[in-house]
């Protein structure tokens, strides 16, 4: 079954967050966007919902994580190329994000990550198109 997906993240300043991701080139779906929430489109039927903290709190009975002190989720999105990975992280840091750690450069994959304005961790990854698929669980045959 193909399902829509909504990743929900609490933010302090919804307008600031929307402006940050708009500047990175992301679009927002007005059907799911209002004074309390902004729905960033990351693919067909896939969204990141930025919710003002007080609104987010209406959906849970437990205390919210402080993303600037605790990692609650790592949001990873694919990129078309290594250059796009670098461009996105460079733009993000110019807009006030903080690079999370050194780039990870493996033979088949390249990734970089940053903490956004609320401390959420975002990773952009490029996978080499001709990379060998990962082995199936339990497959211990030699390549």
Image: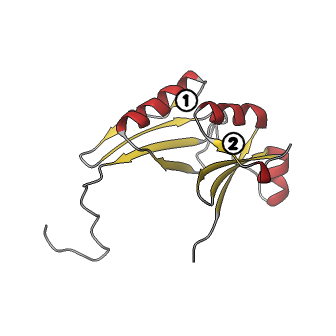
From what the image shows, is residue 102 above or below residue 28? above
Residue drawn at x 42%, y 36% as measured from the top left:
84
Q: Give the label on residue 66, or none.
A: 2
Quadrant of image for the C terminus = bottom left
Residue at mark 1: 92
In the foreground, 69 or 124: 124
Q: Quadrant of the N terminus?
A: bottom right
- For the question of whether residue 45 can be seen, the reply is yes
Q: Position of residue 137 (x, y in %)?
A: 32, 74
Where residue 56 appears, as percent x and y from the top left, is: 79, 51
Q: Which mark is residue 129?
A: none
Nearer-the-camera pick, 89 or 40 = 40
Q: Are marks 2 and 1 in contact (CB under 8 Å)?
A: no
3D distance between C-alphas at marks 2 and 1 = 20 Å
Mark before the other along the chain sequence, 2 or 1: 2
Camera-nearest residue between 140 and 1: 1
Q: Which residue: 30% across, 53% down?
A: 129
Horizontally, residue 76 falls left or right of residue 59, namely: left
Inspect this view and state whether residue 13 appears.
no
Assign a secondary structure to mark 1. Answer: helix
x 64%, y 65%: residue: 4
In this rendering, the answer to whether 16 lies above or below 107 is: above
Residue 103 on image: x %, y %: 37, 35
Residue 96 spot, x, y in % from top left: 60, 24
- Which residue is pictured at 41% across the width and 44% down the height? 80
Q: What crowding class fits label 1: few (fewer than 14 Cα within 10 Å), some (14-19), or many (20 or more)?
A: many
């Amino acid at each position: 079954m193909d399902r829509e997906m909504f990743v929900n993240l609490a933010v302090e300043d919804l307008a600031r967050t929307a402006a940050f991701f708009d500047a990175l080139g992301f679009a927002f779906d007005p059907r799911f966007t209002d004074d309390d929430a902004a729905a960033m489109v990351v693919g067909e039927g896939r969204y990141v919902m930025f919710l003002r903290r007080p609104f987010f709190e209406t959906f849970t009975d437990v205390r919210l994580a402080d993303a600037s002190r605790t990692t609650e989720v790592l949001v990873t999105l694919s990129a078309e190329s290594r250059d796009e990975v670098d461009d996105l992280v460079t733009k993000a840091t110019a807009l006030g994000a903080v690079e999370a750690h050194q780039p990870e450069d493996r033979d088949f994959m390249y990734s970089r990550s940053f903490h956004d304005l609320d401390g959420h961790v975002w990773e952009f990854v490029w996978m080499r198109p001709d990379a060998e698929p990962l082995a199936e669980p339990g497959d211990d045959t030699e390549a």
